[in-house]
Image (cartoon, rainbow, N blue to C red):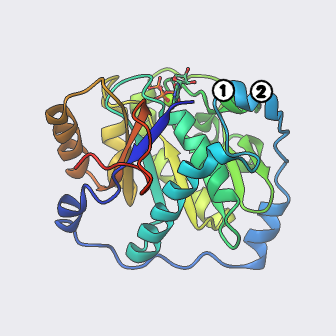
Amino acid sequence: MTAFQTTLEKSQALKDQIPDDAQPDQPTGRQALAQWLALPELWLDVAYLRSQLVVTATPDEAAVPFDILRTRLVCLARQHGWRRIAMVSPAGGAGKTTTAVNLAFALGRQSGLRTLALDFDLRKPTMGRVLGARVPLNMTDLMQGQGHLSSVLRRHGQGMAFGLNDGSVGQSSEWLQSVEAVDLTARFEATYAPDLMLIDLPNLAQADDAIGFLPNVDAALIVVEAGRHSSYDIDVIERQVAEQTRVAGIVLNKCTLPDSPFGPRRTN
Ligand SMILES: Nc1ncnc2c1ncn2[C@@H]1O[C@H](COP(=O)(O)OP(=O)(O)OP(=O)(O)O)[C@@H](O)[C@H]1O
Ligand SMILES: [Mg+2]
């Protein structure tokens, strides 16, 4: 797996232009914890996960860059009271879902933190495939009031659960921008009281799905494929995202530059 670089501070100027919301209610409660612990467990096939470039499910040196990303993200989230973090990318195949899953496992290993990673790429949901897990329903079924939230959730350990889909749905853009999608996000939050939600969205080039949903999150991580976009393009994307929500940072994925001994390189 190639190295990647993070520039979590790169967007500080843009981010600071948007006032922070009031701190959300702290997720506590025995009921939420009981519901969380009652979720069906994810069956881990470490060899399969590795074939999907998921390296954080078990302790490994390759997981270190994701641990660094996790720690920076958690610091930012605590500092600003963020709970919902969207994963977006300017074009398809940047590695957004792979990064989301790796980051999710890294977050799951952080004690005292409950993270829910939701596959809201209704157009092309692949989180289940990356994990080698299947669920019987789609997010849109839940949006229509069918089934229980737990039907699409798979928990790993005490700190991590994934929300998956059975397959893609038509009119994904309309679904993602619907009141029902916002309501579903709130229901996940109210039922399981996660500290953080990572929400995997369709890439920005595909349609208006992701941009339309971004006002519902606290911040977004932009995953960019190294060498595919000019710095001008990345600036444009960053501004587009910043018009809808705060930019938590940019992950430069599939980067072939060696890491600096002083940590991941920054592009700014
Ligand atoms: N750091 C990496 N190095 C090499 N290959 C990678 C890396 N990250 C992801 N990939 C590979 O790139 C491909 C696309 O990854 P992924 O599905 O995560 O992208 P995506 O941004 O979610 O795509 P989409 O826009 O279609 O949702 C997959 O084959 C994945 O294994
Ligand atoms: Mg994806």
Amino acid found under the numbered disc labelled 1: Gln
User: Pointer 1 and pointer 2: residues touching (CB < 8 Å)?
Assistant: yes
Q: Is residue 81 visible?
A: yes
Residue 16 to residue 259: above or below: below
Q: Is the distance from the Cβ of mark 1 to the nearest ligand 1 atom less than 8 Å? A: yes
Q: Which residue is situated farthest in the front direction here?
A: 261
Mark 2 = which residue?
48
**Horizontal relation, residue 50 to residue 229: left or right:** right
Could you classify mark 2 by the number of other residues whose Cα lies within 10 Å: few (under 14), some (14-19), or many (20 or more)?
A: few
- Give the percent coordinates (x, y) of residue 53: 63, 30
**Horizontal relation, residue 118 to residue 239: left or right:** right
Q: Nearer the viewer, residue 100 or 141?
A: 100
Q: Nearer the viewer, residue 122 or 157?
A: 157
Residue 127 to residue 56: above or below: above
Residue 153 to residue 12: above or below: above
Q: Nearer the viewer, residue 127 or 175?
A: 127
Place residue 109 in its image quadrant: bottom right
- Give the percent coordinates (x, y) of residue 236: 16, 38
Residue at image point 73% right, 45% down:
57
Place residue 245 in its image quadrant: bottom left
Mark 1 = which residue?
52
Residue at image point 48% right, 30% down:
95
Q: Which mark is residue 4?
A: none
- Give the percent coordinates (x, y) of residue 188: 62, 57
Residue at image point 40% right, 22% down:
92
Query: SS at mark 2?
Result: helix
**Horizontal relation, residue 221 to residue 184: left or right:** left
